Image (cartoon, rainbow, N blue to C red):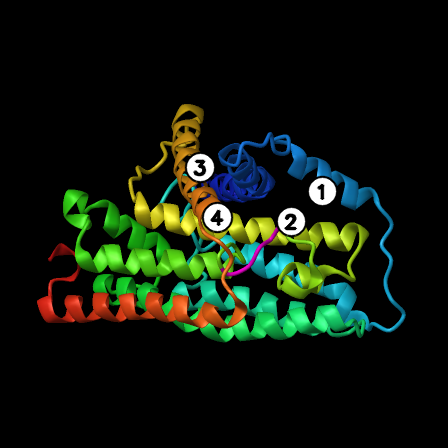
Amino acid sequence: MNHDTLKHLTLLLIHLGLLLLLSPFIHIYIKKIKATLQGRIGPPVLQGYYDLAKYFHKETVVSNQTSWLFSITPFIVFSTTITAGLLIPTFSSKEFIVPLGGVILFIYLFSLGRFFMTAAACEPGSSFCSMASSREIMFATLIEPVILLPLFIFVCLYGTNNIFEIVNQLSNKGITLYTPTYVLSLIAIFIASLAEMCRVPFDNPETHYELTMIHEGMLLEYSGKQLGIMFLSSWLKQLIIISLIANLLFPWYTTPDFTLASISLLGVIYLLKVLVVSTLIAFIETTVAKVRLFRVRDILMASFIMSIIALVISVYKGKGLGI
């Protein structure tokens, strides 16, 4: 194994390690900020790790009404989510692996996991799981085009669907980056991302009322290690989407020198950017109420219209984000 291969493998492992280790922390961090804003104490910052340890030590109970699909779904969801994590930058925008795909693969890896999750939720025959599965599919048909269009704007402007390359080109823009096209596209992505992460105002991940559950409702029949894997996948997906937003909002990177000091500094910068976006999400959830189910399409339609306006401005000016 030559030096370059070893370097790329090391950076890849650091990348995956950051995502896996930070995802439970960011999940609890958002809860902690919300609790602080509401005058409560909130959970300990390590509560996510305690919960995972609890789930992985518990016995897994599976209904005899389910097939192999129900048992294998947590591993499929985790695999598709962690693969999507390889397509977004964390501590460096320098791509350290052979390109696996771009924007379309990134979005539809999540869709693949959602497909298996909704199918598995219907297997036990629970009315609540089936209802949550139906709502998740309805959300998916609304979210995917809304989140793809603003991403396609970046793809068209920079001639690549590779997220690493898009962030690299954004980082060279400087102050000229913040244009109407960029701002409208980013707002549209952020709104659609809240729906993709099942956050308020689209869904309430902290609710225990079955009639309002969507994502959580599909997990009611899981237990033990399988439930732990599903929760970890959900938290990992949340961190990946937050990382995407942070990379687009603060595309300031340098290539690591493959030294401990360089990688540590870039890791701290990445963490700060993620914490800023997570704090913004917590603030929105504290100040905005969950909307009724049939008003979700109105909010996503507003996001879609923002993307269309951004596209029209870009085409009219003909100068990309440098208008």
Q: Which numbered circle lies on residue 275?
A: 3
Quadrant housing residue 69: bottom right
Residue 176 in view here? yes
Kindly indicate whether the residue at mark 2 contacts the one at mark 1 (C-beta within 8 angstroms): yes
Q: Position of residue 56 (x, y in %)?
A: 78, 45
For marks 1 and 4, give the CA distance.
24 Å
Q: Any magenta on residue 156? A: no
**Residue depicted at 44% across the width and 35% down the height:** 271
For marks 2 and 3, give the CA distance.
19 Å
Q: Any magenta on residue 205? A: yes
Depth check: give the residue in front, 126 or 15: 126
Q: Which residue is mark 4?
A: 285
Q: Nearer the viewer, mark 4 or mark 3?
A: 4
Q: Position of residue 316 (x, y in %)?
A: 11, 71
Q: Which residues are magenta?
A: 202-206
Mark 2: secondary structure: helix
Mark 4: which amino acid? Glu
Q: Nearer the viewer, mark 1 or mark 4?
A: 4
Q: Is residue 264 above or below residue 191?
A: above
Quadrant housing residue 43: top right
